[in-house]
Amino acid sequence: MEHKKALIAMSGGVDSSVAAYLAQQAGLQCIGGTMQLLCQSNGDAEDARAVAQRMGMDFHIFQMTEQFRQQVMDKFVRCYEEGLTPNPCVDCNRHLKFGALLEQAQAMGCDYVVTGHYCRIEKNPETGRYNLYKAKDASKDQSYFLYTLTQQQLSHTLFPLGAFSKEEARLIAQEQGFLNARKRDSQDICFIPDGDYMEFIRAYTQKEYPDGDFLDANGKVVGRHHGAIGYTRGQRKGLGLAMGQPVYVCSKDMQKNTVTVGSNEALFSTTVIADDWNFIPFEALNAPLRCMAKARSRMTEQPATVYPMENGRARVVFDDPQRALTTGQAVVLYDGDAVLGGGTIIEIE
Protein backbone atom coordinates (compact mmCIF):
# COMPACT_ATOMS: atom_id res chain seq x y z
CA MET A 1 0.00 0.00 0.00
CA GLU A 2 3.02 2.32 0.08
CA HIS A 3 2.69 5.42 -2.10
CA LYS A 4 -1.05 4.78 -2.50
CA LYS A 5 -3.54 7.45 -1.50
CA ALA A 6 -6.95 6.89 0.06
CA LEU A 7 -9.93 9.08 0.82
CA ILE A 8 -11.48 7.90 4.08
CA ALA A 9 -15.26 8.27 4.23
CA MET A 10 -15.63 9.52 7.81
CA SER A 11 -19.12 9.75 9.26
CA GLY A 12 -18.04 10.81 12.74
CA GLY A 13 -18.73 7.33 14.08
CA VAL A 14 -16.33 4.82 15.56
CA ASP A 15 -16.29 2.42 12.58
CA SER A 16 -15.08 4.89 9.98
CA SER A 17 -12.58 6.32 12.47
CA VAL A 18 -11.03 2.90 13.08
CA ALA A 19 -11.07 2.21 9.34
CA ALA A 20 -9.04 5.40 8.90
CA TYR A 21 -6.55 4.27 11.54
CA LEU A 22 -6.17 0.81 9.99
CA ALA A 23 -5.70 2.28 6.52
CA GLN A 24 -3.01 4.60 7.84
CA GLN A 25 -1.30 1.72 9.63
CA ALA A 26 -1.28 -0.22 6.35
CA GLY A 27 0.86 2.51 4.81
CA LEU A 28 -1.74 4.45 2.86
CA GLN A 29 -1.51 8.21 2.55
CA CYS A 30 -4.90 9.11 3.99
CA ILE A 31 -7.22 12.07 3.59
CA GLY A 32 -10.37 12.32 5.70
CA GLY A 33 -13.66 13.37 4.19
CA THR A 34 -17.25 13.72 5.36
CA MET A 35 -20.18 13.83 2.97
CA GLN A 36 -22.57 16.58 4.00
CA LEU A 37 -25.93 15.00 3.22
CA LEU A 38 -29.03 16.12 5.09
CA CYS A 39 -29.22 13.75 7.99
CA GLN A 40 -26.12 14.18 10.16
CA SER A 41 -26.19 15.84 13.53
CA ASN A 42 -24.09 19.00 13.68
CA GLY A 43 -21.49 17.22 15.76
CA ASP A 44 -20.80 14.34 13.38
CA ALA A 45 -18.55 16.27 11.00
CA GLU A 46 -16.68 17.81 13.92
CA ASP A 47 -16.13 14.36 15.48
CA ALA A 48 -14.74 13.19 12.15
CA ARG A 49 -12.53 16.25 11.88
CA ALA A 50 -11.19 15.72 15.40
CA VAL A 51 -10.22 12.11 14.66
CA ALA A 52 -8.59 13.10 11.37
CA GLN A 53 -6.60 15.82 13.07
CA ARG A 54 -5.50 13.42 15.79
CA MET A 55 -4.03 11.20 13.06
CA GLY A 56 -2.44 14.10 11.20
CA MET A 57 -4.75 13.75 8.20
CA ASP A 58 -6.10 16.52 6.02
CA PHE A 59 -9.87 16.73 6.29
CA HIS A 60 -12.57 17.91 3.89
CA ILE A 61 -16.34 18.28 3.95
CA PHE A 62 -18.03 17.49 0.64
CA GLN A 63 -21.39 19.11 -0.02
CA MET A 64 -23.61 16.39 -1.46
CA THR A 65 -27.00 17.44 -0.17
CA GLU A 66 -28.56 17.83 -3.61
CA GLN A 67 -27.32 14.44 -4.85
CA PHE A 68 -28.60 12.84 -1.65
CA ARG A 69 -31.97 14.52 -2.02
CA GLN A 70 -32.39 13.51 -5.66
CA GLN A 71 -30.96 9.99 -5.61
CA VAL A 72 -31.99 8.80 -2.17
CA MET A 73 -34.74 10.87 -0.56
CA ASP A 74 -36.75 11.61 -3.71
CA LYS A 75 -36.62 7.95 -4.69
CA PHE A 76 -37.64 6.89 -1.18
CA VAL A 77 -40.76 9.06 -1.35
CA ARG A 78 -41.57 8.10 -4.94
CA CYS A 79 -41.38 4.39 -4.13
CA TYR A 80 -43.73 4.72 -1.18
CA GLU A 81 -46.17 6.67 -3.34
CA GLU A 82 -46.05 3.81 -5.84
CA GLY A 83 -46.77 1.22 -3.14
CA LEU A 84 -43.20 -0.09 -2.84
CA THR A 85 -40.97 -0.46 0.22
CA PRO A 86 -37.59 1.01 -0.81
CA ASN A 87 -34.13 0.46 0.64
CA PRO A 88 -32.44 3.89 0.86
CA CYS A 89 -29.20 2.52 2.34
CA VAL A 90 -28.61 0.53 -0.86
CA ASP A 91 -29.21 3.66 -2.93
CA CYS A 92 -26.92 5.78 -0.76
CA ASN A 93 -24.10 3.26 -1.09
CA ARG A 94 -24.64 2.97 -4.82
CA HIS A 95 -24.91 6.63 -5.73
CA LEU A 96 -23.17 8.54 -2.94
CA LYS A 97 -20.50 6.57 -1.06
CA PHE A 98 -19.27 4.54 -4.01
CA GLY A 99 -20.50 6.89 -6.73
CA ALA A 100 -20.07 10.59 -6.04
CA LEU A 101 -17.49 10.11 -3.28
CA LEU A 102 -15.38 7.74 -5.36
CA GLU A 103 -15.43 10.28 -8.19
CA GLN A 104 -14.32 12.93 -5.71
CA ALA A 105 -11.52 10.67 -4.49
CA GLN A 106 -10.23 10.04 -7.99
CA ALA A 107 -10.37 13.76 -8.80
CA MET A 108 -8.10 14.27 -5.76
CA GLY A 109 -5.64 11.69 -7.04
CA CYS A 110 -6.65 8.96 -4.59
CA ASP A 111 -6.40 5.29 -5.46
CA TYR A 112 -9.06 4.12 -3.01
CA VAL A 113 -12.10 5.03 -1.00
CA VAL A 114 -12.01 3.51 2.48
CA THR A 115 -15.19 3.05 4.53
CA GLY A 116 -16.13 1.53 7.87
CA HIS A 117 -18.42 -1.13 6.42
CA TYR A 118 -18.18 -4.63 7.86
CA CYS A 119 -17.47 -6.80 4.81
CA ARG A 120 -14.50 -7.94 2.73
CA ILE A 121 -13.16 -7.62 -0.82
CA GLU A 122 -10.79 -10.13 -2.39
CA LYS A 123 -9.49 -10.43 -5.93
CA ASN A 124 -9.80 -13.82 -7.60
CA PRO A 125 -6.40 -14.50 -9.22
CA GLU A 126 -7.92 -16.91 -11.74
CA THR A 127 -10.70 -14.69 -13.06
CA GLY A 128 -9.19 -11.31 -12.21
CA ARG A 129 -12.54 -10.23 -10.76
CA TYR A 130 -13.00 -8.58 -7.41
CA ASN A 131 -15.39 -10.46 -5.14
CA LEU A 132 -17.40 -9.26 -2.16
CA TYR A 133 -17.63 -11.36 1.00
CA LYS A 134 -19.46 -11.18 4.30
CA ALA A 135 -17.69 -9.81 7.35
CA LYS A 136 -15.96 -12.25 9.68
CA ASP A 137 -18.33 -10.95 12.40
CA ALA A 138 -21.68 -12.21 11.10
CA SER A 139 -23.62 -10.05 13.57
CA LYS A 140 -22.23 -6.88 11.94
CA ASP A 141 -22.15 -8.01 8.31
CA GLN A 142 -23.32 -5.29 5.89
CA SER A 143 -22.82 -7.08 2.58
CA TYR A 144 -26.58 -7.10 1.86
CA PHE A 145 -26.46 -3.32 1.39
CA LEU A 146 -23.45 -3.44 -0.96
CA TYR A 147 -24.54 -5.88 -3.67
CA THR A 148 -24.69 -3.07 -6.26
CA LEU A 149 -20.91 -2.50 -6.22
CA THR A 150 -19.40 -2.85 -9.69
CA GLN A 151 -15.98 -4.24 -10.57
CA GLN A 152 -14.69 -0.70 -11.03
CA GLN A 153 -15.98 0.34 -7.61
CA LEU A 154 -14.73 -2.81 -5.86
CA SER A 155 -11.27 -2.37 -7.35
CA HIS A 156 -10.99 1.09 -5.78
CA THR A 157 -12.58 0.32 -2.39
CA LEU A 158 -11.10 -0.94 0.88
CA PHE A 159 -13.04 -2.30 3.87
CA PRO A 160 -10.48 -2.56 6.71
CA LEU A 161 -13.05 -3.70 9.29
CA GLY A 162 -14.02 -6.87 7.46
CA ALA A 163 -11.90 -9.06 9.74
CA PHE A 164 -12.83 -7.30 13.01
CA SER A 165 -15.69 -7.47 15.47
CA LYS A 166 -17.44 -4.35 16.71
CA GLU A 167 -15.90 -4.69 20.16
CA GLU A 168 -12.44 -5.04 18.63
CA ALA A 169 -13.07 -1.84 16.68
CA ARG A 170 -14.17 -0.01 19.83
CA LEU A 171 -11.09 -1.28 21.68
CA ILE A 172 -8.82 0.09 18.96
CA ALA A 173 -10.64 3.43 19.12
CA GLN A 174 -10.18 3.55 22.89
CA GLU A 175 -6.49 2.66 22.63
CA GLN A 176 -6.02 5.48 20.13
CA GLY A 177 -7.89 7.95 22.31
CA PHE A 178 -10.63 8.66 19.78
CA LEU A 179 -13.37 10.81 21.30
CA ASN A 180 -16.07 8.67 19.62
CA ALA A 181 -14.83 5.29 20.92
CA ARG A 182 -18.14 4.70 22.76
CA LYS A 183 -20.41 6.71 20.48
CA ARG A 184 -23.69 4.96 19.82
CA ASP A 185 -24.30 3.46 16.39
CA SER A 186 -26.84 5.21 14.20
CA GLN A 187 -30.14 3.39 13.92
CA ASP A 188 -32.80 3.12 11.24
CA ILE A 189 -32.81 5.48 8.25
CA CYS A 190 -30.57 8.48 8.86
CA PHE A 191 -33.05 11.05 7.54
CA ILE A 192 -35.95 9.61 9.58
CA PRO A 193 -34.38 9.18 13.04
CA ASP A 194 -37.76 8.78 14.78
CA GLY A 195 -38.84 6.02 12.37
CA ASP A 196 -42.11 7.77 11.42
CA TYR A 197 -41.95 7.29 7.64
CA MET A 198 -45.45 8.57 6.96
CA GLU A 199 -44.94 11.84 8.81
CA PHE A 200 -41.62 12.35 7.03
CA ILE A 201 -43.23 11.83 3.62
CA ARG A 202 -46.06 14.25 4.45
CA ALA A 203 -43.57 16.90 5.56
CA TYR A 204 -41.26 16.29 2.60
CA THR A 205 -43.94 16.44 -0.09
CA GLN A 206 -46.29 18.89 1.65
CA LYS A 207 -49.09 16.59 0.55
CA GLU A 208 -51.99 15.08 2.40
CA TYR A 209 -52.56 11.40 1.70
CA PRO A 210 -56.27 10.60 2.03
CA ASP A 211 -57.83 7.96 4.23
CA GLY A 212 -59.14 4.86 2.48
CA ASP A 213 -60.59 1.42 3.02
CA PHE A 214 -59.09 -1.61 4.66
CA LEU A 215 -60.32 -4.69 2.81
CA ASP A 216 -60.32 -8.35 3.77
CA ALA A 217 -59.28 -11.14 1.40
CA ASN A 218 -62.79 -11.16 -0.11
CA GLY A 219 -62.78 -7.43 -0.83
CA LYS A 220 -65.11 -6.55 2.06
CA VAL A 221 -64.51 -3.22 3.77
CA VAL A 222 -63.36 -3.87 7.36
CA GLY A 223 -62.15 -0.44 8.43
CA ARG A 224 -60.46 2.81 7.43
CA HIS A 225 -56.76 3.48 7.03
CA HIS A 226 -54.93 6.82 7.21
CA GLY A 227 -53.13 6.81 3.87
CA ALA A 228 -51.94 3.70 2.04
CA ILE A 229 -48.34 4.95 1.90
CA GLY A 230 -48.08 4.36 5.64
CA TYR A 231 -48.40 0.58 5.49
CA THR A 232 -45.94 -2.16 4.56
CA ARG A 233 -46.55 -5.78 3.67
CA GLY A 234 -46.43 -7.95 6.79
CA GLN A 235 -47.25 -5.06 9.12
CA ARG A 236 -49.46 -5.88 12.12
CA LYS A 237 -49.02 -2.97 14.52
CA GLY A 238 -50.93 0.26 14.10
CA LEU A 239 -53.77 -1.09 11.97
CA GLY A 240 -56.47 -0.36 14.55
CA LEU A 241 -58.63 -3.25 13.39
CA ALA A 242 -60.60 -5.51 15.72
CA MET A 243 -61.30 -8.63 13.70
CA GLY A 244 -61.23 -11.34 16.35
CA GLN A 245 -57.81 -12.58 15.22
CA PRO A 246 -54.49 -11.00 14.28
CA VAL A 247 -54.41 -9.56 10.76
CA TYR A 248 -51.53 -8.26 8.67
CA VAL A 249 -51.08 -6.04 5.64
CA CYS A 250 -51.06 -8.34 2.60
CA SER A 251 -51.21 -5.91 -0.32
CA LYS A 252 -52.01 -2.36 -1.37
CA ASP A 253 -53.75 -0.81 -4.38
CA MET A 254 -52.39 2.72 -4.66
CA GLN A 255 -54.78 3.66 -7.47
CA LYS A 256 -57.84 2.71 -5.43
CA ASN A 257 -56.19 3.73 -2.13
CA THR A 258 -57.04 0.41 -0.48
CA VAL A 259 -55.05 -1.80 1.88
CA THR A 260 -55.89 -5.51 1.99
CA VAL A 261 -55.34 -7.38 5.24
CA GLY A 262 -55.37 -11.07 5.99
CA SER A 263 -53.96 -13.88 8.07
CA ASN A 264 -50.29 -14.54 8.67
CA GLU A 265 -50.55 -17.58 6.40
CA ALA A 266 -51.52 -15.32 3.49
CA LEU A 267 -48.10 -13.65 3.66
CA PHE A 268 -46.10 -16.69 2.58
CA SER A 269 -44.87 -17.09 -0.99
CA THR A 270 -42.00 -18.80 -2.74
CA THR A 271 -41.25 -16.69 -5.79
CA VAL A 272 -40.20 -13.14 -6.64
CA ILE A 273 -39.26 -11.47 -9.91
CA ALA A 274 -36.51 -8.87 -9.67
CA ASP A 275 -34.82 -6.45 -12.05
CA ASP A 276 -31.91 -4.00 -11.93
CA TRP A 277 -29.51 -6.86 -11.24
CA ASN A 278 -25.83 -6.55 -10.47
CA PHE A 279 -23.68 -9.67 -10.42
CA ILE A 280 -20.21 -9.72 -8.89
CA PRO A 281 -18.25 -12.92 -9.71
CA PHE A 282 -19.66 -12.94 -13.27
CA GLU A 283 -21.14 -10.48 -15.72
CA ALA A 284 -24.60 -11.94 -16.26
CA LEU A 285 -26.85 -14.84 -15.34
CA ASN A 286 -27.09 -17.17 -18.35
CA ALA A 287 -28.37 -20.37 -16.71
CA PRO A 288 -30.31 -21.39 -13.59
CA LEU A 289 -28.28 -20.86 -10.44
CA ARG A 290 -28.52 -22.67 -7.10
CA CYS A 291 -27.63 -20.41 -4.21
CA MET A 292 -28.73 -18.98 -0.90
CA ALA A 293 -30.84 -15.83 -0.97
CA LYS A 294 -32.41 -13.30 1.34
CA ALA A 295 -34.97 -10.61 0.63
CA ARG A 296 -34.36 -8.28 3.56
CA SER A 297 -31.28 -7.47 5.59
CA ARG A 298 -32.22 -9.33 8.78
CA MET A 299 -33.55 -12.41 7.04
CA THR A 300 -31.56 -15.64 7.32
CA GLU A 301 -30.46 -16.78 3.87
CA GLN A 302 -32.60 -19.50 2.38
CA PRO A 303 -31.89 -22.04 -0.41
CA ALA A 304 -33.22 -20.90 -3.76
CA THR A 305 -32.88 -21.25 -7.52
CA VAL A 306 -32.53 -18.19 -9.74
CA TYR A 307 -33.77 -18.36 -13.32
CA PRO A 308 -32.77 -15.79 -15.96
CA MET A 309 -35.60 -14.04 -17.80
CA GLU A 310 -35.85 -11.57 -20.65
CA ASN A 311 -35.01 -7.87 -20.30
CA GLY A 312 -32.44 -8.43 -17.57
CA ARG A 313 -34.94 -9.77 -15.08
CA ALA A 314 -34.64 -12.95 -13.04
CA ARG A 315 -37.04 -15.16 -11.10
CA VAL A 316 -35.93 -16.24 -7.62
CA VAL A 317 -37.71 -19.37 -6.38
CA PHE A 318 -37.15 -20.25 -2.74
CA ASP A 319 -37.23 -23.92 -1.77
CA ASP A 320 -39.65 -23.08 1.05
CA PRO A 321 -42.28 -20.34 1.32
CA GLN A 322 -40.97 -17.11 2.83
CA ARG A 323 -42.90 -14.57 4.87
CA ALA A 324 -43.74 -11.06 3.70
CA LEU A 325 -41.62 -10.82 0.57
CA THR A 326 -42.02 -7.19 -0.46
CA THR A 327 -41.75 -5.24 -3.71
CA GLY A 328 -39.08 -2.55 -3.66
CA GLN A 329 -36.77 -4.52 -1.40
CA ALA A 330 -33.52 -6.13 -2.53
CA VAL A 331 -33.09 -9.86 -3.00
CA VAL A 332 -29.40 -10.71 -2.53
CA LEU A 333 -27.72 -13.97 -3.54
CA TYR A 334 -24.92 -15.77 -1.67
CA ASP A 335 -22.61 -18.72 -2.12
CA GLY A 336 -21.29 -19.28 1.39
CA ASP A 337 -19.70 -15.97 2.38
CA ALA A 338 -19.49 -14.72 -1.19
CA VAL A 339 -22.05 -12.22 -2.49
CA LEU A 340 -23.11 -13.30 -5.96
CA GLY A 341 -25.25 -10.25 -6.64
CA GLY A 342 -28.72 -8.92 -6.18
CA GLY A 343 -31.70 -7.13 -7.69
CA THR A 344 -34.83 -5.18 -6.79
CA ILE A 345 -38.07 -7.10 -6.25
CA ILE A 346 -40.77 -5.91 -8.65
CA GLU A 347 -43.31 -8.74 -8.39
CA ILE A 348 -44.31 -11.49 -5.97
CA GLU A 349 -45.77 -14.72 -7.30
Image (tube, rainbow, N blue to C red):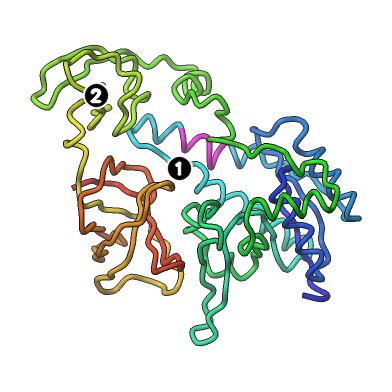
Name the residue located 39 percent from the left edge and 57 percent from the top edge.
332
Number of numbered discs visible in the structure rendering: 2
Q: Name the foreground residue: 229 vs 63.
A: 229
Instruction: Please name the residue that numbered disc 1 is placed on.
Output: 87
In the image, the segment drawn in magenta is 69-76
Label 1, residues with CA under 10 Å away: few <14, some 14-19, many ≥20: many
Q: Quadrant of the N terminus?
A: bottom right
Q: Quadrant of residue 22?
A: bottom right
Where disc 1 sits, the SS reads loop
On the rendered structure, is 223 left or right of 197? left
Where disc 2 sits, the SS reads strand
Residue 275: x and y, percent?
A: 33, 55
Name the residue located 59 percent from the left edge and 56 percent from the top edge.
118
**Residues at discs 1 and 2 in contact (Cβ within 8 Å):** no
Residue 44 located within the stretch drawn in magenta: no
Q: Name the foreground residue: 19 vs 184.
A: 184
Instruction: Please name the residue that numbered disc 2 is placed on.
Output: 259
Q: Quadrant of residue 105?
A: bottom right
Instruction: State the separation of the CA atoms marked 1 and 2.
Output: 21 Å
On the rendered structure, is 340 left or right of 311? right
Residue 101: x and y, percent?
A: 67, 53
Q: Is residue 333 above or below residue 228?
A: below
Label 2, residues with CA under 10 Å away: few <14, some 14-19, many ≥20: many
- Disc 1 or 2, which lies upstream in sequence? 1
Given the current orientation, which residue lies at the most extreme bottom position?
Answer: 126
Q: Amino acid at mark 2?
A: Val
Q: Is residue 137 above or below residue 207?
A: below
